Image (cartoon, helix red, strand yellow):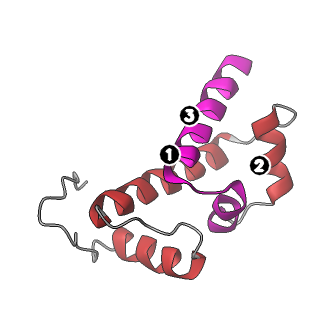
């Protein structure tokens, strides 16, 4: 189990870093208390599988937003706009601004 947690911890931390998103903003999007996520990232706490999947799904959606907006950077600090964009993405109502954006739709 520790190996799995380390793998998830590393993967989520890498995605956060690549996006330039803070743990606090990810917590806000996920409705999670920051101290729980902080404990997970330093290795002193665990998250439930459902929580890990939810965090992963949020980060994947944020990566899709970044790709759709490329070359314009996405401000992952603006939570209100980010929530609206994630909802539009979920509803398949968000379109790329760059005709060359290469985003797979699922």
Is there any visible trace of residue 46 in the rendered image?
Answer: no
2 vs 1, front mark? 1
- The Cα atoms of the two marked residues, 1 and 3, are separated by 11 Å
Q: Position of residue 9 (x, y in %)?
A: 66, 33
User: Could you tell whether 32 is left or right of 69 in the image?
Assistant: right
User: Could you tell whether 24 is left or right of 73 in the image?
Assistant: right
Whether residue 13 appears in magenta in the rendering, the answer is yes
Circle 1: element type: helix
Q: Label for residue 18?
A: 1
Verify CB contact (< 8 Å) between mark 2 and mark 3.
no
User: What residue sits 43% from the left and 67% below the top?
Assistant: 74
Verify CB contact (< 8 Å) between mark 1 and mark 3.
no
Magenta stretch in the rendered image = 1-30
User: Could you tell whether 43 is left or right of 79 in the image?
Assistant: right
Which residue corresponds to mark 2? 37
Circle 3: element type: helix
Image quarter for residue 100? Answer: bottom left
1 vs 3, front mark? 1
Q: Position of residue 86 (x, y in %)?
A: 44, 70
- Mark 1 or 3, nearer chain start: 3
Q: Position of residue 28 (x, y in %)?
A: 69, 67
97 shown above or below 66: below
User: What residue sits 67% from the left and 17% below the top?
Assistant: 3
Q: Looking at this view, name the residue that lies furthest to the left.
A: 99
Which SS does the magenta portion mostly show? helix
Image quarter for residue 63? Answer: bottom left
Give the quarter of the figure containing the N terminus. Answer: top right
Which residue corresponds to mark 3? 11
Q: Nearer the viewer, residue 99 or 36?
A: 99
């Amino acid at each position: 189990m520790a190996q799995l947690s380390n793998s998830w911890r590393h993967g989520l931390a890498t995605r956060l870093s690549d996006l330039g998103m803070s743990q606090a903003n990810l917590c806000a999007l996920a409705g999670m208390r920051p101290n729980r996520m902080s404990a997970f990232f330093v290795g002193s706490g665990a998250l439930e599988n459902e929580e890990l999947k939810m965090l992963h799904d949020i980060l994947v959606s944020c990566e899709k937003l970044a790709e759709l907006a490329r070359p314009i950077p996405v401000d992952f600090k603006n939570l209100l706009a980010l929530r609206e964009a994630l909802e539009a993405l979920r509803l398949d109502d968000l379109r790329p601004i760059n005709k060359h954006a290469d985003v797979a739709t699922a």
